[in-house]
Image (tube, grey):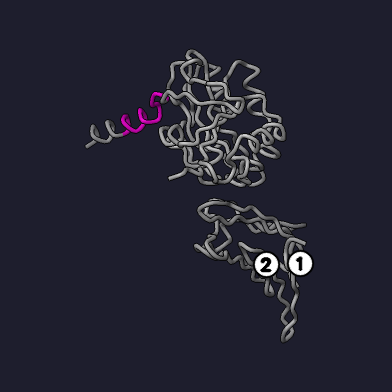
Amino acid sequence: MTRLLALSLLASSLAFADPAPDFTLKDLDGKTVKLADFKGKTVVLEWFNPGCPFVRNSHTKGSLVTTAKKHTQKGVTWLAINSGAPGKQGHGVEMNREAKKMFSLDHPVLLDESGQVGKAYGATNTPHMFVIDKTGQIVYRGAIDNSPDGEGASPQGGKLINYVDAALEDLAAGRPVKVPQTKAYGCGVKYGS
Amino acid sequence: MRWLALTLVVCGCATTRMQHAEWVVEVKQDRLQLQALGGYHVNPDYPLSFRGEGVSVERAQFTVEEKRATARIPRKPGVFAFSVCDPANCVIEKVELTPH
């Protein structure tokens, strides 16, 4: 029984470190971006929808205001992905361009209109965060932080924890990611089907 | 004005009511109620709160159902923060309330 439990725990911990599915998407200027091009680098994927109030809160008041800039300066690659289908909230090149400007994003916003990449990662929310280590393993998946209002005003347990920041600090220090998975909050990803 | 806000005094009981296309917020004496309208439901993950000067009613003190959330609140001014969603959209709102 104990052995069975141990095997089960091992299996669930391995599930947290799945290989990151490769993808090829276009950015808002039509430039092709391949995940494989960033082999050997730490990559953060942020599921994005500029029409979602949780995304807007996170980028204007919450944890996403500074996290991307802080870590891209240290060599981390940060990619926002919009898996919204045509006609759905937050879809469209112009709307995403405006959001990129409004939120002062220096990183690319990639369009995944078919939703194939979002579904391959199991992205359910915006924002939904994935941290991929230098070996191509997903080492964190879940919420940006523990304040499900998106603005950092209601942290569970009273202290704001930015899970992505913590995961990236762990990786930078050569430590295993202490919290590899949390429940994402925010809007549902606006898949077409 | 985005919301329709009404204060009614009936039988000596004051009711503050705010209505929007997706929701109705009503305060009757010390009872705060959020009702989601149409295809909207109360966002179960959102940290509902009613906060003001010396006032803090947090998520755990609310009774949350699919279409409705209720709580007892002090008769002091505060801001009620909540979120309702339908399959296509989520709305986050913060409304100032002055219970009578």
Q: Three-letter amino acid code at disc 2?
A: Gln
Q: Which mark is residue A136?
A: none
Subunit bearing disc 2: B
Horizontally, residue A78 falls left or right of residue A21, namely right
In reply to whether residue B51 is colored magenta, the answer given is: no
In the image shown, does B48 or B43 lie closer to the viewer? B43
Number of numbered labels in the structure image: 2
Q: Quadrant of the N terminus of chain A?
A: top left
Q: Position of residue B76 (x, y in %)?
A: 75, 65
Horizontally, residue A119 falls left or right of residue A106, namely left
Residue at 46% over, 26% down: A139
Circle 2 is placed at which residue position? B19
Magenta region, residue range: A9-20
Tell me the element at label 1: loop
In the image shown, does A188 or A193 lie closer to the viewer? A193
In the image shown, does A116 or A177 lie closer to the viewer? A116
Circle 1 is placed at which residue position? B98
Label 1 crowding class (10 Å Cα cut-off): few <14, some 14-19, many 20+?
some
Label 2 crowding class (10 Å Cα cut-off): few <14, some 14-19, many 20+?
some
Q: Quadrant of the C terminus of chain A?
A: top left
Q: Three-letter amino acid code at disc 1?
A: Thr
Tell me the element at label 2: strand
